[in-house]
Amino acid sequence: MSTLVEDFNRRRIDYWSKRSAVERAEREKRTSPRNPIASNVNYDCAREMFLGVTRPLDKPDPDPDSQERMKNGNVAAAAARRELEDMGYQVIETEGPMEPFRNRAGTVVYTGRVDFKITHEGRKVPVEAKEVSVFVFDAVDRYEDLERFWWTRKYKGQILVYMLQNNEPRGVLLLTCQGRKHMIDVVLEDRLEDAERALALGEEVVAAVESGTPPPYTKDPTACRHCWAFGIACNPPIEEQGAALLDPSGELYEQLIIRAEAEAAHRLYEAADKRAKELIKAAGIEKGICGDFAIAITERPVKAETKLRAARVDRIVKIVRAGAAVNQEVA
């Protein structure tokens, strides 16, 4: 007789395997033409977008962990929407498919499905909700922070395409994490370069699909290593990427191994460091003691860098643990 835990583990894998099989069968039956979708704007590689359109069945089925995260993302988006409604916002066009985005020639460049819109000051602001990890939630405060991770870079193109299609000058990325949430304001006028690049990518992919000639390989070898198509539908020659083969038995490889093994701890530290300093600043103190930690806050004037970056005063948090060497950490 199996335990409940053993039975659950078995049923979990079986459940998601069946779900994957059903979804794959539906994709196999599809006969309508495919085109790029807004959520797959890939600033790193147009070829991956092309393969997503032309060889969708080559894409591996997501594992149970990934499927659960995706389902949780849908649940979190719905919960955030209801909470916004409770705050008094008018939420409209929930999970509504956007009108296909067409170029001047009338060709469909992108399709997609916006999570919802919020009416605000006479506008219908597109909102794309993303459930993210604690680390990403704490690391991404502004639009510029989306550049930190390859998957968050896709968020930029997605919201910008929704804004362009809906002719809205502003949009919002709503990040959620374990019930916490914050909005990232996206102003189209400030992000025209990214918006134009997203449109150019879509048009490049559509033209490549029509001609049957895939876009060139990316020149960034790191973009390949996390791509679903690498080694399955795409096998870029190393020389195509301008990458040199380095000695895997030397000091560099040893340091790369250490770096990889320390990555999780480093991410945990960064998230905890940022959150701790937020809590310290919110407490409104200049000095404090918390257990065996001493805390001090000082102010540092910063001159204006450009017309858009005015002069400011930064509050610098210093944290020292009793018995440890002095270690000043700058917020």
Image (cartoon, rainbow, N blue to C red):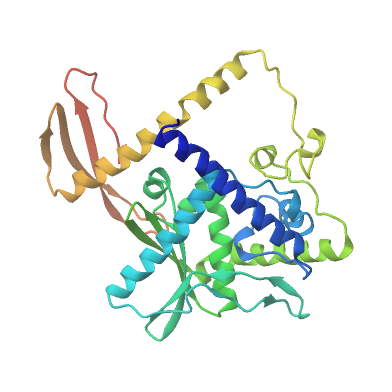
Q: Is residue 193 left or right of residue 217?
A: left
Looking at the picture, tell me which residue is in the foreground, 90 or 192: 90
In the depicted structure, whether residue 268 falls above or below residue 124: above
Q: Quadrant of residue 233?
A: top right
Which residue is at a point 48% across and 50% down the rendered structure image?
69
Residue 54, given in percent of the width and then of the height, sits at 79, 58
Which residue is at a point 75% across and 28% down the rendered structure image?
244
Q: Looking at the rendering, in which quadrant would you find the N terminus? A: top left
**Which residue is the extreme one toward the bottom?**
122
Residue 290, given in percent of the width and then of the height, sits at 13, 33
Which residue is at a point 39% across and 59% down the rendered structure image?
309
Residue 120, given in percent of the width and then of the height, sits at 37, 80
Q: Quadrant of residue 286?
A: top left
Q: Is residue 254 left or right of residue 73?
A: right
**Which residue is the extreme one toward the front?**
1
Which residue is at a point 80% across and 39% down the rendered structure image?
235
Query: How many numbered marks appear?
Result: 0
Looking at the picture, tell me which residue is in the foreground, 227 or 190: 227
Res. 308 visible in picture: no
Res. 86 visible in picture: yes
Residue 322, given in percent of the width and then of the height, sits at 16, 22
In the depicted structure, whether residue 128 falls above or below residue 1: below
Q: Looking at the rendering, in which quadrant would you find the C terminus? A: top left
In the depicted structure, whether residue 194 falls above or below residue 302: below
Q: Is residue 318 left or right of residue 78?
A: left
In the depicted structure, whether residue 140 falls above or below residue 276: below
